[in-house]
């Protein structure tokens, strides 16, 4: 056997060993890619639509909350005035009786 033939034989052996080690890694990469694709599909079909639905429902509620906040502040001011009037009237009634 010549040196060239020996080098080719060694090269073939190394290539077979490398292929044997690479095949499980390639299978794992394919599995990971398939899982990534599955996750992408779930995000695209389920999660995005759920987030969109939440956003569509949140915005009207947020606007309503902003509108009602001003009303609540106004009602609180009215309640404070009524408390003061009732207190004054109660004091006046106490003085009279």
Image (cartoon, helix red, strand yellow):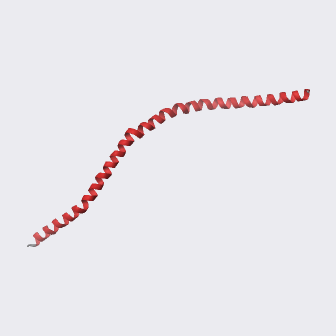
Q: Residue at x 27, y 59 (%)?
A: 24
Q: Quadrant of the N terminus?
A: bottom left
| Residue 88, quarter of the rendered image | top right
| Residue 65, quarter of the rendered image | top right
The single residue placed furthest to the left in the displayed view is 1
Q: Quadrant of the C terminus?
A: top right
Position in image of residue 26 (x %, y %): 26, 56
Position in image of residue 11 (x %, y %): 16, 66
Position in image of residue 19 (x %, y %): 21, 61
The answer to whether 57 appears left or right of 89 in the picture is: left
Q: Residue at x 28, y 58 (%)?
A: 25
Tag count: 0
Residue 33, compared with residue 90, is above or below; it is below
The front one of 41 and 60 is 41
The front one of 21 and 8 is 21
Position in image of residue 67 (x %, y %): 60, 29
| Residue 40, quarter of the rendered image | top left
The answer to whether 63 appears left or right of 6 in the picture is: right
Q: Residue at x 41, y 39 (%)?
A: 48
Residue 21, compared with residue 1, is above or below; it is above
Q: Residue at x 44, y 37 (%)?
A: 50
Residue 78, compared with residue 6, is above or below; it is above
């Amino acid at each position: 056997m010549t040196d060239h033939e020996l080098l080719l034989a060694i090269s073939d052996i190394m290539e077979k060993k490398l292929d044997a080690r690479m095949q499980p890694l390639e299978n794992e990469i394919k599995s990971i890619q398939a899982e990534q694709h599955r996750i992408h599909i779930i995000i695209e079909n389920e999660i995005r639509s759920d987030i969109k639905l939440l956003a569509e429902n949140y915005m009207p509620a947020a606007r309503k909350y902003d509108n009602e906040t001003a009303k609540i502040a106004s009602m609180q001011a009215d309640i404070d005035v009524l408390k003061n009037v009732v207190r004054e009237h109660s004091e006046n009634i106490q003085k009279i009786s």
